[in-house]
Image (cartoon, grey):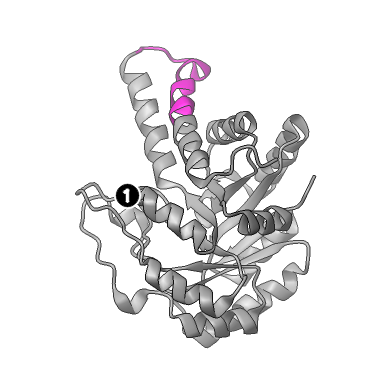
């Protein structure tokens, strides 16, 4: 099986993106992998610190390995939004393919320092994603409020160049008007594609990552891929789909057998994953 770096480089060269789909439940994993298998798409399974602590680092590794063997798919695992070297070290030791250090709220020099530490420990086998610029608000706080995208929180192109050069990261997550979550007041995140283009000029061929892909304007997503985004993270849309499907299944039935009511939630997740794989143009890439 080709490694993750191969697929990221290919995506960059050919102008498509790999979807990272987060999970905290086995039914979500089954949904993600089932669609990737049908659509012949490489896929990244993501766990935040909270998701990984709930699910288990080792358990996630075991399932990745089992599903790789069963399907033959290029399935990769990323520790998403790790806030400390210590926890990322645990993920690396467990066998994650990739780790993301989120030092975006730290001073630039401190962010660089810890990112370098993570990169050194990861070596060549585990990819490291860094982050620069603050991506608007935490998802848990934005479902019922308008979100302000602040200019000072966007990634600064010159700082991105410095960060990339000093850390040697494999990927860079950027803040370009994207946000975590899906506010329900009609606000649709619009990306600052002009800022993305400026960052691209400074970092060259360094692969870039778009966090907060849920609910983002599709035309913006396609243009962002053209401008160097090779990985797009989806989480909130999956959570909403899973929760809605589960509520409907339980509301419409008195069934108490999990394997009879969970499929409806799984099918809802499958629909979202399929739509994103098409949008990212990663189908038939294996």
Q: Which residue is mark 1?
A: 182
Q: Which residues are magenta?
A: 253-268
Q: Is residue 51 left or right of residue 95?
A: left
- Of the pair 250 and 38, the residue shown nearer to us: 38
Q: Secondary structure at mark 1?
A: loop
Can the viewer see residue 97 in this picture? no
Residue 152: percent from left, percent from top: 33, 79
Q: Is residue 254 magenta?
A: yes
Query: Residue 133 location in percent, x, y?
Result: 43, 74
**8 to 120, vertically: above or below:** above
Quarter of image, res 261: top left
Residue depicted at 43% across the width and 53% down the height: 221
- Quarter of the image holding residue 243? top left
Q: Residue furthest top?
A: 254
Q: Is residue 102 visible?
A: yes
Is 129 in the magenta?
no
What residue is drawn where x is 58% and y is 44%? 282
Task: Measuring from the top left, give residue 94's x and y in whole percent.
Answer: 73, 54
The residue depicted at 78 percent of the width and 49 percent of the height is 2
Within 10 angstroms of label 1, few (less than 14), some, or many (20 or more) residues? many
- Split into 4 quadrants, where in the image is the N terminus? top right
Nearer to us in this view, 90 or 223: 223
State which quarter of the image contains the C terminus.
top right
Q: Magenta segment, principal secondary structure?
A: helix
Q: Is residue 181 toward the left or the right of residue 281 in the image?
A: left
Find residue 180 and report its horizontal and vertical position in percent.
Answer: 38, 57
Residue at horizontal 62%, vertical 59%? 12
């Amino acid at each position: 099986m080709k490694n993750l770096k191969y697929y990221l480089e290919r995506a960059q060269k050919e102008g498509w993106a790999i979807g990272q789909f987060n999970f905290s439940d086995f039914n979500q994993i089954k949904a993600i992998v089932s669609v990737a298998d049908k659509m012949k798409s490489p896929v990244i399974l993501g766990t935040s610190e909270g998701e990984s602590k709930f699910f288990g680092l080792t358990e996630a590794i075991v399932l990745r390995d089992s599903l790789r063997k069963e399907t033959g798919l290029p399935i990769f695992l990323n520790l998403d939004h790790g806030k400390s070297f210590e926890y990322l070290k645990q993920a690396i030791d467990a066998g994650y393919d990739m780790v993301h250090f989120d030092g975006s709220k730290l001073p630039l020099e401190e962010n660089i320092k810890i990112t370098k530490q993570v990169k050194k420990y990861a070596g060549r086998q585990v990819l490291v994603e860094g982050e620069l610029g603050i991506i608007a608000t935490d998802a848990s706080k934005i479902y019922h409020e308008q979100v302000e995208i602040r200019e000072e929180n966007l990634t600064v192109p010159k700082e991105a160049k410095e960060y990339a050069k000093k850390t040697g990261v494999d990927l860079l997550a950027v803040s370009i008007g994207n946000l975590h979550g899906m506010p329900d007041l009609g606000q649709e995140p619009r990306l600052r594609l002009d800022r993305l283009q400026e960052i691209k000029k400074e970092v060259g061929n360094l692969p870039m990552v778009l966090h907060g892909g849920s609910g983002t304007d599709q035309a913006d997503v396609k243009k962002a891929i053209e401008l160097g985004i090779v990985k797009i993270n989806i989480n909130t849309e999956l959570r909403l789909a899973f929760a809605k499907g589960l509520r409907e299944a339980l509301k419409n039935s008195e069934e108490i057998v999990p394997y009879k009511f969970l499929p409806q939630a799984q099918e809802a997740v499958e629909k979202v994953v399929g739509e994103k794989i098409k949008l990212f143009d990663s189908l038939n890439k294996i």
